[in-house]
């Protein structure tokens, strides 16, 4: 297991590589080229420049997030062929830079959805929250505007303000698109890129839908155990794998996370670990501590360990605490606490297993 932290780059992140290097047990970062729009090829020289900066700080860059899939691929438009070819070139370039895992998603329009980026907690910290009732009566444009206005001046992944101008057009394109259509377009995408992954030794790790239900009538197709079974059979290759996000899948009470890990463990290459407090129709993110939320983080880490997980973990979204001002969910302090907590759980589980307790 390798503990990592998501990093948005020195010009887009309040957290520095030097600070990340000082978090006990963290050995790498999971970056992205956020300046490039979805569908463009990531240039090898730019990738290598990012890698050098990270390695000069004493960290690794083996897992990449947000190599975003162009909407035309999700929609199955004729232009999808061009964007699939571009994606294959991205895979080749990332492989040459030593990247082993690519995290991506297949969610239409929105990467993830929250209704509050700074919900006040009883202890004075703030967290990300989703309340289904607050979405009722709102338009997608309203959501974009609220996210942009409450992000402390930072672009939130998937909610960049420059995308707001294309939202109406995108929703029009998605009219009549069903879950079956989305599945077929995902199949086409995977059939196009997996042979390249196999040739270059790169594993794809799809991120489940966040939250795991339809939003604004847009279909979501990676929500539960049945969906994951279907996904892995679409193209049955070790290079077609999963990012196991506890906060996303855990938002549904029907998902038994430890059981899912044990079932799909050999195809989980990346894990986003966070806790949430789940209520009917809404949830808020909490500290990573099991007792603070609805998820048993010990059992989740135990399931990963017992499944032989040797991939990458990052503590997912953290709260804002101790007066920190940062991109919501991506400050330093709570994610550092989360990394230390998860590493502690991993050590406890591994020692207990070795000693036969």
Image (tube, rainbow, N blue to C red):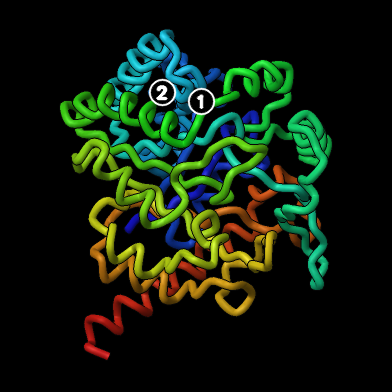
Give the image location of residue 171, x and y in percent: 65, 23
- Please give the residue where the numbered disc 1 appears in the rendered image: 33
Residue situated in front as seen by the camera: 101 or 303: 303
Looking at the picture, does residue 299 appear above or below residue 78?
below
Q: Quadrant of residue 131?
A: bottom right
Q: Is residue 110 left or right of residue 192?
A: right
Is 254 drawn above or below residue 71 in the view shown? below
Q: Is residue 72 visible?
A: yes
Q: Residues within 10 Å of mark 2 (few under 14, many from 20)?
A: some
The N terminus, quarter of image: bottom left
Question: Dividing the picture into quarters, in which one does residue 46 lie?
Answer: top left
Q: Which residue is mark 2?
A: 47
Q: Front-most of 97 and 122?
A: 122
The reply to whether residue 94 is visible in this rendering is no
**Residue 195 locus on image (x, y percent):** 19, 26
Answer with mark 1 or mark 2, whichever residue precedes in sequence. Answer: 1
**Residue furthest to the left:** 199
Q: Are marks 1 and 2 in contact (CB under 8 Å)?
A: yes
Q: Residue at x 38, y 69 (%)?
A: 258
């Amino acid at each position: 297991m390798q503990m990592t932290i998501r990093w948005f780059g020195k010009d887009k992140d309040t957290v520095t590589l030097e600070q990340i290097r000082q978090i006990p047990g963290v050995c790498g970062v999971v970056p992205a080229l956020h300046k490039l729009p979805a569908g463009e090829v990531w240039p090898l020289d730019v990738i290598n420049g990012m890698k050098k900066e990270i390695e000069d700080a004493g960290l690794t860059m083996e897992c990449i997030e947000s190599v975003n899939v162009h909407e035309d691929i999700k929609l199955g438009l004729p232009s999808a062929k061009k964007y699939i070819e571009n994606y294959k070139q991205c895979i080749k370039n990332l492989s040459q830079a030593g990247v082993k895992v690519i995290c991506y998603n297949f969610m239409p329009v929105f990467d993830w959805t929250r209704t509050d980026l700074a919900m006040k907690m009883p202890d004075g910290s703030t967290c990300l929250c989703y309340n289904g009732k607050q979405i009722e009566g709102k338009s997608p444009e309203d959501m974009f505007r609220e996210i942009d206005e409450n992000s402390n001046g930072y672009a939130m992944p998937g909610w960049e303000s420059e995308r707001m101008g294309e939202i109406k057009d995108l929703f029009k394109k998605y009219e009549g698109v069903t879950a079956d259509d989305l599945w077929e377009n995902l199949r086409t995408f995977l059939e196009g890129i997996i042979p390249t992954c196999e040739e270059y030794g790169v594993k794809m790790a799809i991120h489940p839908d966040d939250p795991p239900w339809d939003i604004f009538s847009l279909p979501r197709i990676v929500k539960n155990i049945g969906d994951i079974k279907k996904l892995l059979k679409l193209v049955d290759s070790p290079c077609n794998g999963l990012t196991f996000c506890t906060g996303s899948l855990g938002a549904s009470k029907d998902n038994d996370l430890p059981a899912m890990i044990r079932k799909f463990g050999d195809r989980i290459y990346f894990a986003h670990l966070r806790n949430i407090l789940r209520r009917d129709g809404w949830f808020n993110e909490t500290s990573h501590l099991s007792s603070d939320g609805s998820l048993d983080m010990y059992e989740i880490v135990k399931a990963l360990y017992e499944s032989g997980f040797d991939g990458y973990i990052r503590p997912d979204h953290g709260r804002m605490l101790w007066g920190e001002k940062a991109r919501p969910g991506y400050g330093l302090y709570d994610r550092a606490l989360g990394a230390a907590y998860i590493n502690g759980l991993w050590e406890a589980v591994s020692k207990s297993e070795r000693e036969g307790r």
